[in-house]
Amino acid sequence: MNTKRIAVLLSLLILFSLGLHAQTQHKKSTHSSLSASIAAGKNIYIQNCASCHQTDGGGVGNMNPPLIKTTYVLGDKTTLIKIVLNGFSENVEINGQTYQNNMASHDFLKDQEIADVLTYVRHSFTNKASAITASQVKTVRANNKPAK
């Protein structure tokens, strides 16, 4: 093999290795940021949500709904974010049981805090759903302002 071919092959090998390294670093940072969001969300959940929805997410019969595999938790992110921002005062039926306790607005929480707690709920209690970001919360909050 001549030196020019070896140089080209080495260059290709280096570029390929750098590409793999960049992909691995992105996966690590995504995983660690998700882990950090879940950890922060757990603390927010314990402080603001566990008294009604319980530490296991099981809720309280006929009062506070469970957060385990419900369409409210696993479904549309915007709806879930609006529930946290606006509270919830409707009766809701989940798995044949009606829950009727009002949930107060938690709009005092920062966008990142809401994103973290909802990401925690969507990844806990046997739930498996995508994360919610602070920018998603910010968008919903901005579009959620009452008309004047």
Image (cartoon, grey):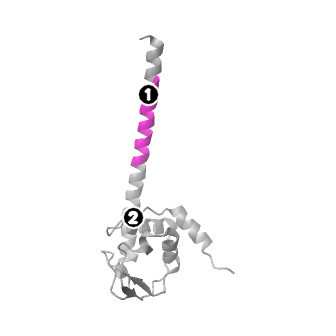
Which label belongs to residue 14? Answer: 1
What stretch of residues is rendered in magenta?
11-28
Residue shown at 48% from the left, 76% from the top: 84
**Given the current orientation, which residue lies at the most extreme right position?**
148
Label 2 belongs to which residue?
Answer: 40
Q: Is residue 68 magenta?
A: no
Q: Which quadrant does the N terminus fall into?
A: top left
Location of residue 141 (image quadrant) = bottom right
Q: Which mark is residue 95?
A: none
Q: Is residue 108 visible?
A: no
Q: For the residues carrying marks 1 and 2, which lies nearer the camera in this image?
A: 1
Q: How crowded is the residue under tag 1: few (<14 C-alpha within 10 Å), some, or many (20+)?
A: few
Residue at x-position 47% and y-position 63%: 132
Residues packed near mark 2 inside 10 Å, few (<14), some (14 to 19) or many (20 plus): some
Q: Does 9 sit above or below residue 109?
A: above
Percent x, y of residue 16: 44, 31
Looking at the image, tell me whether mark 1 or mark 2 is earlier in sequence order.
Answer: 1
Q: Pointer 1 and pointer 2: residues touching (CB < 8 Å)?
A: no
Residue found at the very far top of the displayed protein = 2
- Amino acid bearing label 1: Ile
Instruction: Locate residue 87, reporting x and y percent.
Output: 49, 81
For this rendering, which residue is in front, 45 or 18?
Answer: 18
Quick check: 69 above or below 4? below
Going by the numbered disc 2, the residue's amino acid type is Ala
Quadrant that contains the C terminus: bottom right
